[in-house]
Each structure stands twice: as C-alpha cells, then as structure tokens.
Amino acid sequence: MIGTIGKDKHGTFHPTGAGLLMFGNEYRIVRHYHEYSLDYREMLDPTIRWTDRLYTSSGEWTGNLFDFYFRVYNKIILNVKVPFKMNGGERVDDTPVHRALREVLANCLVNSDFYVPRGIVIKQKNDILIIENPGTIRVGKYQMKVGGESDPRNKAFMKMFNLIGLVSVQAVEFRSYSLYGIRRDGWSRLLKNHIIRDARF
C-alpha cells in the first residue's frame, strides 16, 4: 500500500488526504485544503510578467501534485546541458543536475504545509530558479545543509516518490544531491529559496 486509499468504519474505501493531494482534482482538493495552491512562472522576458505559467486554478489541468511535479520538471530541464556519455552501449541523458532538480522539486512537495496560506511558488528566470513552499524546516537550516537526518512533513508523499525513484526514504540529502549537482554544472545560484519562511541561501 502506498497510502492513497483508506477505509472507514463501515468498510467504504475513500482517498486519503495524501491520495487526494497527489492524484485528485483541484476543485476537490480545495474543499479539504482551503489554502492549496501551486504556481509555476517562467519569467524569461523582463518586459512582460511571465512567458509561461502553470497554476492550479486555471481549470486547464488536474491541479494535483503528481501532474504538477512532472509538468514543472519537464519545463525546467529544457536548458540543462547533456554532455555525450555512453554506458553499456547506450546514451546516458541523465546528469547530476537532472537528479538534483528531481530531488529538490520532490522535497519541495514532500515538506510543504498545505494548510498554510500562499502555497507553492516556483519562478524560473534566465539565471536563477526560485522554489518557495509554505511551512517551517522541521530539522533546522543547519541540519538540512549538513544532511543525514530527515523529518519529512508528508511521509506518505515521501513513500510515493520513493516508489517511483524520485527521492530517498533515508535522509533528505539536500546537500549531496542538490548542491553538488548544481555547483558541478555551473548552477550554483539555482536555489535562491527552498523553504519560504526559514531558509534563504
């Protein structure tokens, strides 16, 4: 079980809170999580407000976390360089930056507090990617940078992302994956703000 379906005392199956957030529709999600909001803004032209936008209340997509994750990931990797590399006769298209982006994006969702106003906001500019999510850091800023200790806010999300190979069930290795991968490929400024209230790098 991945935690998406529950059963009440009458034996009736229903989606859990995690299941609703991950795979439900936005109009149903906001009935239970009134502050729920996801917003991706591509801001590549300074003369206009945004060049592309994906947000939950548009009504053009499901508005759930699963779709948001993959839609945003596919947008932010468009400019990631993929050097030529072979492994066992096959081309390797996955780089440390790709892995860093997957983990940072997953951690943003896993550690968000969906009862707090504002919601998740991701801004992609020409030279920087800003990721903001509501809620405080449960292990503290220092421990988050050092790594080796994990206290995810939404453990069911962590399990789901782990099952599809996006994030480890062990400590959230923010430093080892995210910072190493970003610095190695010249993305040292990729993370401006991971947790909106307590972390600013």
Image (tube, rainbow, N blue to C red):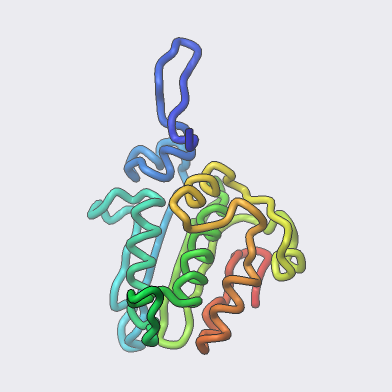
Q: Is residue 78 above or below residue 84?
A: above
Which quadrant does the C terminus fall into?
bottom right
Q: Is residue 74 above or below residue 192?
A: above
Q: Camera-side residue: 157 or 36?
A: 157
Residue 89: give x, y in percent of width and height: 34, 76
Q: Residue at x 50, y 12 (%)?
A: 9
Residue 178: give x, y in percent of width and height: 57, 72
Q: Residue at x 40, y 62 (%)?
A: 39
Residue 152: give x, y in percent of width and height: 63, 50
Q: Camera-side residue: 166 or 47?
A: 166
Q: Is residue 167 left or right of residue 49?
A: right
Q: Residue at x 53, y 45 (%)?
A: 159
Q: Please indicate, yes or no, whether residue 77 appears anywhere in the rendered image.
A: no
Residue 93: give x, y in percent of width and height: 37, 76
Q: Is residue 168 left or right of residue 44?
A: right
- Residue 173 appears in which quarter of the rendering? bottom right
Q: Residue at x 41, y 57 (%)?
A: 38
Q: Is residue 78 above or below residue 152?
A: below
Q: Please indicate, yes or no, whether residue 44 appears anywhere in the rendered image.
A: yes
Outermost residue toward the left in this view: 60
Q: Is residue 68 above or below residue 35?
A: below
